[in-house]
Amino acid sequence: MTVLLVDDDDTLRRDLDLFLGPDYQLIWASGSRQAMMLLGYGVVHDAVILDICLPPFIADVEEREGLELLSLFSGELLPGVPVLVLSSLPRAEIEADCLERGACAVLEKPCSVGKLRQVLKDLIGGEAV
């Protein structure tokens, strides 16, 4: 399974690469600009893990960047690809807005690897290969 991780935290990327292991091929974008460039290469993603707080590129402020990207992903860029929002912002504060913009699930950092794997499995449908 191929998962696009859009998060500017390199430590998280390394941890997820290790903990998700061979079941998931993780493709990392450190921000919106890089994520949009990667999409231009035509790689098919089974799911997206998206942080909300990303360096500004689309929006004028960091707090909105991930939400703007989420709207683009669920709209024209990745229709039908499930998006999991993984954010350090309190889930209660962002969940309604994320779901309204097309997220399929919202988890708060830190979360257990088991929970993350289960949500990915549920979103993608079936066992990881």
Image (cartoon, helix red, strand yellow):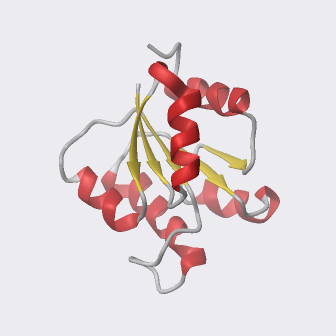
Give the mark count: 0
Q: In the rendered image of this protein, does residue 75 appear above or below residue 118?
A: below
Please state if 73 lies on the left or on the right of 96 as rendered: left
Q: Choose top left, top right, bottom left or bottom right for residue 114.
A: top right
Residue at 45%, 26% in the rendered image:
24
Q: Residue at x 56, y 37 (%)?
A: 16
Is residue 123 at least partly visible in the picture? Answer: no
Pick the quarter of the image with the C terminus: top left
Q: Say which quadrant the N terminus sits in.
A: top left
Name the residue furthest bottom. 60
In front of the other: 92 or 24: 24
Position of 71 with respect to 99 (left or right) is: left
Residue 40 image offset from top left, x and y in percent: 19, 53
Residue 94 sits in which quadrant? bottom right
Instruction: Classify residue 102 as left or right of residue 27.
Output: right
Q: 39 or 26: nearer the eye?
A: 26
Q: Residue at x 72, y 31 (%)?
A: 115
Nearest the camera: 125 or 31? 31
Residue at the location (57% across, 57% down)?
51
Note whether residue 108 is visible: yes
- Residue 24 vs 32, above or below: the answer is above
